[in-house]
Amino acid sequence: MIKIPITHTAILVCMWILVIALSPIYSETVISGVAETKGQGRISDDSYYMQAEQFANIRMRSTIGEYGEFHSVVQLIVSSNTENEFCSQAELERLYLSLVIERFDIKLGLQRLPFGYGFAFRPLDMFTQPSVLYPEARPKGVLSSLITVYPRDELSFSLFCGQQSEDVIQDTRDPVFYGLALTQHHSVFSAQFLYALSVSRDETQPTIGSGGFSTKVDSLIGIILEALYTHDYSSPFEEGSVDHNIQVTAGFDYSWMSGKLYLVTQYCYSSAGYLDSSDSISSLYADPLWADLPFTERKPVIVSNDFYRRHYLYFSILWMPDSYTQGSLSVITALEDGSFLPQVQIEREWLQGCSLGMTTRMPLDMYTISSGHYGELGSTNLGFLIESTFFLKVRF
């Protein structure tokens, strides 16, 4: 999400309220959203952490004439924890104009650019990539333009450009990207091809090209295959390099019992992983005694939003015994060091639009199980033994 400094929060909220107040004058406006009250507890080797949070995701959609729509989404967050930290902030998540004119779609503004059909790992979804570790987090938007042309019902061409930035208010030197996507649908399969260029205004930074495809086959089971090659024009390919990355995912999904039981599994390989199979997780830290230090005092050699190894497996099973209750178990495994992060979630809709739920995560590795080696997804590296979140969610 776009994080707005606290000094801008009041201005942002006032502007958004003004748009809501004026919108009935020129359009039909629909306001919806989610309000969520959370309580989170986390236990580590030598301490515990608790946090209370009030969260609201407020969405507004206004029709403009016959062909246009205006979309905006704002997130409001207030939280407090046992470390006496109080935080309140507003996050601008979406703000874009959509025009649908016969066989043309035009979207302009802060929006999501979703590409690919992957489940947990989505290489083609590189501009607004969802988090595998935190699947409940909404992917952030990117300031961009998207034009889609439909020569026929099953075929479309998309032209897009934009700039990915953490703060759209301040001027930055983030790269600008341009790209083209082709999508073909069929009764039993869908395929998408994409190529994009990332060009930096800083002449010392190289131009990066990314090309790949994603395909999904729906038969007795659903099969996903997706691949993306990201390359730097100025240097040769080398495993471990972020500027030269081959990412490949393959998986399948299957449902039975009239959709009450749903299974997903997916494998992912990324050549840009900082650690290979022979490297210890200790290579990420400058201090050889990193495991004995508090989590906040560790000094990593490299910081990445992605995983540090190259081979991963995702598994998830969802059970819905009735229309109001669902439970799921998902596991992410780092295949090279044997560490894995299981997550259990239970949610029950007690009233219409109102549900209660709980999510629990427990990182495990060879050190946790048998005092063996540390793993990337183990409790020592992630900094906690168990984490539970209780939530009350209201949709309006």
Image (cartoon, rainbow, N blue to C red):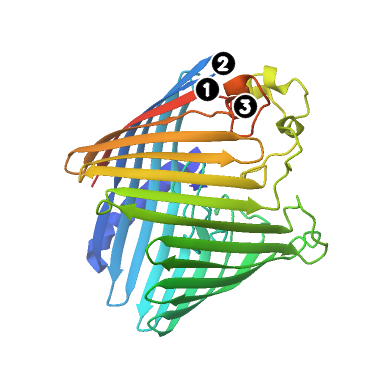
Amino acid type of the residue tagged 2 in the rendering = Asp
Residue 106's x, y, as percent?
Answer: 43, 74
Left or right: residue 16 versus residue 341 is left
> Badge 3 is on which residue?
366
Residue 19's x, y, as percent?
Answer: 32, 57
Inspect this view and state whether residue 15 appears. no
**Residue closest to the eye, 240 or 51:** 240
**Residue closest to the eye, 290 or 321:** 321
Instruction: Specify the quadrant of the image occupied by residue 22.
Output: bottom left
Residue plotted at (54% across, 19% down): 44
Q: Are marks 2 and 1 in contact (CB under 8 Å)?
A: yes
Q: Give the mark nearer the N terminus: 2 vs 3.
A: 2
Amino acid type of the residue tagged 3 in the rendering = Met
Residue plotted at (56% across, 40% down): 333
Q: Give the mark nearer the N terminus: 3 vs 1.
A: 3
> Which disc, if any, is residue 385?
1
